[in-house]
Image: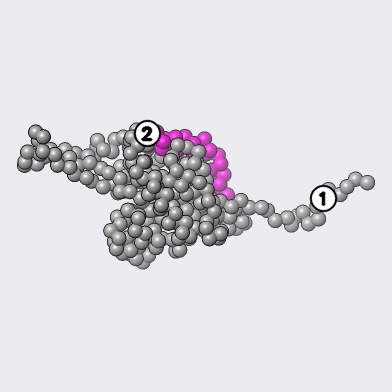
Amino acid sequence: MAPNTEAPGADQRLSVLKTYKLYVNGAFPRTESGRTDPLLDGDGNAIANVCRGSRKDFREAVAAARKAQTGWAQRSAYNRSQILYRAAEMLEGRRGQFESELQLLGASAADARVEVECSVDRLVYYAGWADKLQQVFGSVNPVASSHFNFSMLEPTGVVAAVCPDQPGLLGLISVVAPAIVCGNTVVALASESSPLSAVTFGEVLHSSDVPAGVVNLLTGRRAELQEHFASHMDVNALVLCDIDPAASKELEILSAENVKRTVLRKSVDWHHYDCESPYWILDTQEVKTTWHPVGT
């Protein structure tokens, strides 16, 4: 007699869902809290689990970003440009996967294609500014004394970013790329409702030439983490996207208490060319002015 190969209750089998981890210091750790949230598709079905990052995860990400910042800033501008361009190449090569993930979360095929294309183009755009920003925005200043006076741009340091909820991938790249291209490192909180493609983008960074710690991606709940983003004493700048006005005011006060620069992005059309601007890079740069005596 032939064996019965049909498992009992096969039609009620539970799927083994992938757990998407954080991306910190060039690795993919689970959250130290052990908590996860289910990720639902457009029909409300669970398709994956996403780590629910904690305050400790954020502190460890900031430590990794601080450790990586000096070395990243010391690289040549041309090298940073090459590295961002390589990330764009990797994203282009995996565009089919990213489009599929966006569609899983409810985007139409056309919208998913446009978002991935805009994401690639945005990386290329900011890569192109890496070795041009200093020439365009640096200056030699006229002074009424026997000195040379130079103004040059320097990275702010560690940037914490609360990324927009929609679009999940393009919003993340539009915030991260201008922050890192000229020497900052970033700890970014991905979209709460659509984190899948943002988390997968961590795999792109990992397999490209971006050094460990330059970009750190957390997933979790804004309400739990954004206060820590604003109050952490070793974060130099804070980028807040589409934050509730009441929460925004509170976060700005927390940032001011530790002299942190705060950048607000409100009601932004993330697909528009307005998001491609060297002034978005300047938002996380410092101007250093140097005096040098003439003749010495």
Residue that lies at the very extreme toward the front in this rendered image: 296
SS state under label 2: helix
Q: Tell me where residue 135 sits by quadrant.
A: top left
Residue 68: tell me if it is visible.
yes
Q: Residue at x 42, y 49 (%)?
A: 64
Q: Position of residue 235 (x, y in %)?
A: 35, 54
Q: Disc 2 marks which amino acid?
A: Asn
Q: Residue at x 39, y 47 (%)?
A: 67
SS state under label 1: loop
Q: Which residues are magenta?
A: 82-104
Looking at the picture, tell me which residue is in the foreground, 231 or 201: 231
Foreground: disc 2 or disc 1: 2
Q: Tell me where residue 127 sits by quadrant.
A: top left
Residue holding disc 2: 79
Tell me if 123 is positioned left or right of 151 in this view. right
The quarter of the image holding the C terminus is top left
Q: Position of residue 94 (x, y in %)?
A: 53, 38
Looking at the image, residue 20 lies above or below residue 34:
above
Residue holding disc 1: 6
Q: Earlier in the sequence, mark 2 or mark 1?
A: 1
Tell me if 69 is positioned left or right of 35 in this view. left
Q: Position of residue 172 (x, y in %)?
A: 43, 48
Residue 106: tell me if it is visible.
no
Q: State the CA–CA distance, disc 2 to disc 1.
A: 57 Å
Looking at the image, residue 60 lies above or below residue 122:
below
Q: Position of residue 143 (x, y in %)?
A: 9, 41
